[in-house]
Image: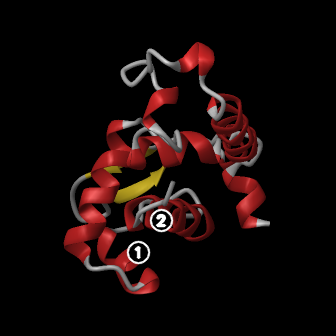
């Protein structure tokens, strides 16, 4: 499993907003400048975060984005899943990719264990943990 730039940038964007908003809306241009991300690519990431309900958006002169909840209410695994989709390291662990050999597979428990460790770790951290 490799986290793409969308997942990595999503975490950076969420941290940036948490640290810089002070309850006010922040424009994507401000975030893009601070994070060194093109505004066009940033808008794609923000759209994913907004669709997941993680951001509040406002239009107009004082518009922009702010967090919809407190930083300690955001689970890192949820943010990554909103931008990356499934974090499962191999297809056979997903419901769609369930393998007919699963019951007799000598490697299944290894892959399941790896998946559990990844899930446990990303779901044990909050946005607030990363900020601190």
Q: Secondary structure at mark 2?
A: helix
Dot label at residue 31? 1
CB contact under 8 Å: marks 1 and 2: yes
Q: How many marks?
A: 2
Q: Is residue 66 above or below residue 20?
A: above
Identify the image quadrant of residue 34: bottom left
Residue occupying the point 35% across, 44% down = 50
Q: Residues within 10 Å of mark 2 (few under 14, many from 20)?
A: many
On the image, numbered disc 2 is attached to which residue?
13
Instruction: Give the residue displayed 61% in from the left and 17% down from the top.
Output: 104
Q: Is residue 77 left or right of residue 47?
A: right
- Looking at marks 1 and 2 on the same chain, the residue that comes earlier in the sequence is marked by 2
Residue pictured at 30% horizontal, 77% vertical: 29
Picture coordinates of residue 65 (x, y %)? 39, 56
For the residue pair 17 and 5, the one nearer the viewer reads as 5
Residue 62, x across and y down, in percent: 32, 63
Q: Which secondary structure, mark 1?
A: helix
Q: CA distance from mark 1 to mark 2?
A: 7 Å
- Closer to the camera: disc 1 or disc 2? 2
- In the displayed structure, would residue 30 be above or below residue 21? below
Q: Is residue 44 visible?
A: yes
Give the percent coordinates (x, y) of residue 118: 68, 45
Q: Is residue 114 above or below residue 1?
A: above
Question: Front-most of 80 and 106?
Answer: 106
Label 1: few (<14), some or many (≥20) within 10 Å? many
* Residue shown at the point (43%, 46%) measured from the top left: 55
Q: Disc number at residue 88?
A: none
What coloring was used for the rendering? secondary structure
| Image quarter of the C terminus | bottom right
Quarter of the image for residue 16 reads bottom right
Residue 125: image location, x then y, percent: 74, 48
């Amino acid at each position: 499993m490799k986290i793409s730039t969308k997942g990595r940038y999503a975490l950076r964007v969420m941290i940036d907003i948490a640290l810089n908003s002070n309850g006010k809306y922040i424009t994507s241009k401000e975030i893009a400048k601070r994070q060194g991300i093109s505004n066009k690519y940033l808008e794609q990431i923000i759209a994913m975060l907004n669709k997941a309900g993680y951001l509040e958006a406002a239009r107009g002169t004082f518009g922009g984005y702010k967090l919809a909840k407190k930083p300690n209410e955001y689970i890192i695994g949820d943010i990554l899943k909103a931008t990356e989709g499934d974090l499962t390291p191999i297809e056979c662990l997903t419901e769609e990719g369930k393998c007919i050999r699963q019951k007799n597979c000598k490697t299944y428990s290894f892959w399941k264990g790896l998946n559990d460790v990844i899930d446990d770790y990303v779901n044990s951290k909050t946005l607030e943990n990363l900020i601190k």
